[in-house]
Each structure stands twice: as C-alpha cells, then as structure tokens.
Image (spheres, helix red, strand yellow):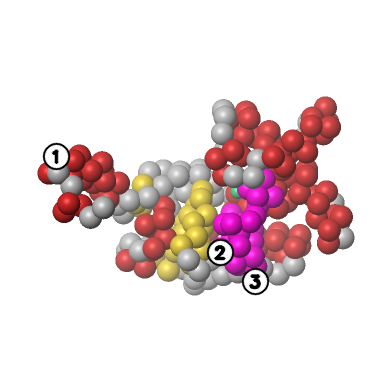
Amino acid sequence: MPISTLRPLAAAALLATALPALAQPGPASACLFIYHAGLHTLPDGSLSDDASPTAQQRYSRLLREARQRITDTFGAPQASPLVVFFSQPQGFGRYRLNAVRSAQFIGSRACVLMGPKGQNVDALAHELVHAEIHHRAGALKRWLQLPTWFDEGVAMQVDYRPRYTLPADDAAKASQVRQLNSFGAFFAGDEQTVVRNYARARYEAAGWLARAVGWAE
Ligand SMILES: [Zn+2]
C-alpha cells in the first residue's frame, strides 16, 4: 500500500519506525555506498578509515596472509571482494557495524567489513571464503540453495581458532548441524550454542569436502 493512502497517524507511526534505521545505516548500506564513505584506498585495493602507514601496512600484510591461507587450502582465490578495515568498534562514518566482522553481498558486489576486534588471519580468511563461495556459486544460488551450516562449515576450513575445535565427545552428534539450513537456525541460541554450531559445521564440511572433491582433511 502506498504511504499516501495510509491514515496520517499510521503513516507517522511507520515513518517513526523507519527513520532510526535510515539515520544509522548498517552494513548493507555501507557496502552499497562504500565509495562515498571517505575511506582511504590501500595499494592492494582494500579500504580503510585509518590513514596511518603503520595501520595500512598491517592491513595489507593481513590480507596477503589470509589470501595465502585460502590458496593453500582451496587454491588461488577467484573472488575479488571489497575488503574494508575500520578502526572504531561502532563502524565508520555514519555506518553502524559489527565490531568483529561481516560479509555483505549486494547483488554482485561483495564487501568484507573487518572491525577492530576481528583483524586477524582466521577471521579475515573466514570472511573471504564466504565471498569466494558467493562468487563461485552465484548470489541467487547461494541465497536460495546453500544451507547455512555448509556455508559456515566451508568458511571454517581456513579458520583455525581453537575455540571452534570439536570436542572429541561431540563428534557423534556433529551431524545434527546439518539440520541448521537457515541463517536464523544456525545463529539461534546463546554464544556457547553458536560456537558449538561452528565447530560441528567445520567438522562436517571437512568430511563432505574429503568425500565430494577428494579434499584432504
Ligand atoms: Zn561465517
């Protein structure tokens, strides 16, 4: 229904709901309008809100190491997402972002947004694999068909953080993660549950890759 046909009170209520979202745009808007966000472009093409040479060298080294890890695991990356490093936990400019990291896909554009709490090789390589899957599977196919547990499980193959190692006594239950096909199902629950989902997804995807494409676990 067009907003002009709503009763004035209802229209005002609708605007009141929508306006805070417009005032504090999130990661999808940041990805869409990234070239208008006043960021600095690094020699490797990534973007940063930090102009200091020390920070930029650190970001470029991190990107090199993450890409190398993907090459060592899956072969040379084919995707070329926009990688953005930002230094403030709340985001950059007017964009409110996750202080750790997120991968955003707007049509064919992929953005990997790395906050100050996520600037390590594990987290960056993980997000770059999401971009790789997006690129190779195609946006629509990924969105419609790829189960979240599988998307996360493949990304976890380059994420070596020990907290996501499956405890030996949980291996028999790991396949339960295959029921978590949607984003909402995978990320439901407390932190401990989500960490367990990641660990199970890493384990299950490694097994699937070994069987399906002869990938060495
Ligand atoms: Zn992920």
Residue 9 is tagged as: 1
Amino acid tagged 2:
Ala
Instruction: Give the residues in magenta.
Output: 127-152
- Residue assigned mark 3: 78
Neighbourhood count class around disc 1 (C-alpha, 10 Å): few under 14, some 14–19, many 20 upward:
few
Can residue 82 be seen here?
no
Dot 2: what SS?
A: helix
Q: Give the amino acid type for the residue marked by disc 3 in the picture.
A: Gln
Distance from label 2 to label 3 (Cα)? Answer: 15 Å
- The residue under label 2 is 139
Alpha carbon separation for disc pair 1 and 2: 39 Å
Residue 79 coordinates in the image, percent (x, y):
60, 69
- Please tell me the numbered disc located at residue 114: none
Picture coordinates of residue 23, whole percent (x, y): 25, 48
76 lies left or right of 116 = right
User: Looking at the magenta stretch, what is its main secondary structure?
Assistant: helix
The magenta stretch spans residue 13: no
Residue 197 makes an appearance in the image: yes
Toward the viewer: 160 or 55? 160
Q: Secondary structure at mark 3?
A: loop
- Is 139 in the magenta? yes
Which residue is found at the position 65% from the left and 50% from the top? 147
Labels 2 & 3 near each other (Cβ < 8 A): no
Q: Is residue 198 above or below residue 52?
A: above
Residue drawn at point x = 61 percent, y = 39 percent: 186
Tally of numbered discs: 3
- Look at the numbered disc 2 and say if its residue's Cβ is closer than 8 Å to ligand 1: no
- On screen, residue 45 above or below 9: below
